[in-house]
Image (cartoon, rainbow, N blue to C red):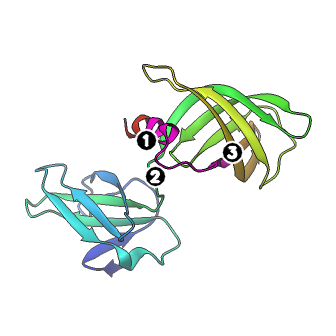
C-alpha cells in the first residue's frame, strides 16, 4: 500500500527488499506539526517529510524511503511525544495505603514516564499513584524520586510489567532536563 509516495508496511522488524537484500530500519519521531526528519544513513542527506497521512492508522507504521543517492531504507514512525530509552535500572517502588515497598527494575524511560518490572505481584491497579526511586547510570549517578500514575499493568510469569506517567508533568524543570539528556544519549 502506498501513501504520500512512500510504501506503507506493518509487521516484524525484519524488513527485506524484493531482491532479499536487508534494508536498514530507523526509528523517527513525529513532531507536533506531523513532520519527521529523515536522514539517509548512506549519504547523510536530511529531508523533512509530512507524515500527516499516517496519523489515523492505529498500528505500527513503516515507510520505505528512497534517497536521491539511490539508497533505500525503512523508517519506523514513532508516535510517542518523547524518545524512550531501554534501560535496566534497579530501584524501589512504594505503593498502597500502607506504603508497601517492592524491588523493581526500570525497563524503559522517557521524559514523560517509564515501564517497570516487579518480580513479586503487588496489589496495584490502573490509575493508582506510586512512588518510584532509582538511580540513573549516568556519570552523576542521579537519583530519581518521582510519583507515577499507573497507565497499564501486564501480569506475566515473571511478575508485573507496569507502565506509568510521571506526576506532575514538569516540562522544562530540572527533572525534565536531566531525563531529556539521559534518554537522548
Measuring from the top left, give residue 8's x and y in whole percent: 36, 72
Measuring from the top left, give residue 23's x and y in whole percent: 27, 54
Against 35, is 101 above or below? Answer: above
Whether residues under marks 1 and 2 lie with C-beta atoms below 8 angstroms apart, the answer is yes
Which residues are the magenta region?
A: 163-179
Measuring from the top left, give residue 41's x and y in whole percent: 19, 49
Whether residues under marks 1 and 3 lie with C-beta atoms below 8 angstroms apart, the answer is no
Q: Quadrant of the N terminus?
A: bottom left
Q: Is residue 100 magenta?
A: no
Whether residues under marks 2 and 3 lie with C-beta atoms below 8 angstroms apart, the answer is no
Mark 2 and mark 3 lie on one chain; the one further toward the N terminus is 2
Tell me which residue sits at (70%, 30%) in the image.
104
Q: Is residue 170 magenta?
A: yes
Name the residue carrying label 1.
Answer: 180
Distance, label 1 to label 3, CA atoms, is: 17 Å
Q: Residues within 10 Å of mark 3 (few under 14, many from 20)?
A: many
Distance, label 1 to label 2, CA atoms, is: 9 Å
Tell me which residue sits at (14%, 62%) in the image.
67
Q: For numbered disc 2, what is the local secondary structure?
A: loop
Q: For numbered disc 3, what is the local secondary structure?
A: strand
Tell me which residue sits at (30%, 59%) in the image.
74
Q: For numbered disc 1, what is the local secondary structure?
A: helix
Q: Position of 76 compared to 24: left or right? A: right
Name the residue carrying label 2.
Answer: 82
Q: Residues within 10 Å of mark 1 (few under 14, many from 20)?
A: many
Foreground residue among 88 and 169: 169
Mark 1 and mark 3 lie on one chain; the one further toward the N terminus is 3
Which mark, by number, is residue 78?
A: none
Which mark, by number, is residue 148?
A: 3
Against 67, is 90 above or below? Answer: above
Q: Nearer the viewer, mark 1 or mark 2?
A: 1
Amino acid at each position: 500500500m502506498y501513501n504520500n509516495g512512500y510504501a506503507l508496511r506493518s509487521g516484524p522488524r525484519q524488513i527485506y527488499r524484493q531482491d532479499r537484500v536487508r534494508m536498514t530500519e530507523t526509528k523517527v519521531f513525529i513532531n507536533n506539526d506531523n513532520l519527521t526528519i529523515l536522514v539517509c544513513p548512506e549519504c547523510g542527506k536530511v529531508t523533512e517529510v509530512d507524515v500527516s497521512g499516517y496519523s489515523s492508522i492505529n498500528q505500527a507504521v513503516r515507510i520505505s524511503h528512497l534517497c536521491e543517492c539511490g539508497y533505500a531504507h525503512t523508517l519506523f514512525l514513532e508516535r510517542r511525544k518523547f524518545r524512550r530509552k531501554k534501560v535496566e535500572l534497579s530501584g524501589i517502588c512504594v505503593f498502597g495505603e500502607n506504603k508497601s515497598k517492592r524491588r523493581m527494575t526500570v525497563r524503559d524511560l522517557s521524559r514523560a514516564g517509564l515501564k517497570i518490572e516487579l518480580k513479586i505481584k503487588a496489589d496495584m491497579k490502573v490509575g493508582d499513584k506510586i512512588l518510584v526511586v532509582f538511580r540513573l547510570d549516568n556519570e552523576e549517578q542521579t537519583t530519581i524520586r518521582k510519583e507515577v500514575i499507573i497507565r497499564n499493568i501486564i501480569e506475566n510469569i515473571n511478575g508485573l510489567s507496569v507502565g506509568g506517567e510521571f506526576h506532575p508533568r514538569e516540562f522544562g524543570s530540572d527533572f525534565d532536563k536531566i531525563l531529556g539528556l539521559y534518554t537522548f544519549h
